[in-house]
Amino acid sequence: MVRRETSAPEPSGKDRRGLGASSASAFNKLYWTRISLGVFAAFAAEGVFRIVGGDYTDGILVGVLVYFASYYLARYTWFRNVEPEKVSKVYSTGIGGYVMLFLFVWILLFTLGV
């Protein structure tokens, strides 16, 4: 006689906590939101740099503040019920693309003198 183990049925979408299939699209949305905010932050940093006339730290501060704002926006809107162990993924999703695009656009705008 062979015994087969039956697995428990998978919980429905409302019962799941953590990162399921629906959160994959939320992470995709978060990634592209941060990419677009990187471009926006570069324009804002260039504007602050031209208006205030300070040094480059003002522009970097703008970029950091926009990134933190995107974290809190995502954390308390799309990822309200995420497990505490997975919060670091919300924080780190798109950070490389954000930083690289922010720096590229900001340097381009500074070089062009816009």
Image (cartoon, rainbow, N blue to C red):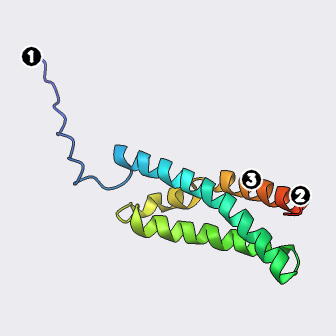
Whether residues under marks 3 and 1 lie with C-beta atoms below 8 angstroms apart, the answer is: no
Residue drawn at 71 percent across, 70 percent down: 44
* Residue type, numbered disc 3: Met
Q: Check disc 1 and report its element: helix, strand or loop.
A: loop
**To which quarter of the image does residue 52 belong?**
bottom right
Q: Mark number for residue 112?
A: 2
Which image quarter is the C terminus in? bottom right
Q: Mark number for residue 18?
A: none
Where in the figure is residue 72, as x and y percent of width and height?
A: 50, 71
Residue drawn at 71 percent across, 73 percent down: 62
User: Closer to the camera, 84 or 42?
Assistant: 42
Q: Name the residue beneath numbered marker 1.
A: 1
User: Closer to the camera, 53 or 71?
Assistant: 53
* Residue type, numbered disc 1: Met
Examine the rendered structure and indicate whether residue 33 appears above or below residue 69: above
Depth check, mark 3 against mark 2: the one in front is 2
Where in the figure is residue 86, as x and y percent of width and height?
A: 46, 57
Q: Name the residue beneath numbered marker 3.
A: 100
What is the count of numbered marks?
3
Whether residues under marks 2 and 1 lie with C-beta atoms below 8 angstroms apart, the answer is: no
**To which quarter of the image does residue 14 belong?**
bottom left
Which image quarter is the N terminus in? top left
Q: Which of marks 2 and 1 is nearer the N terminus?
A: 1
Residue drawn at 17 percent across, 29 percent down: 5
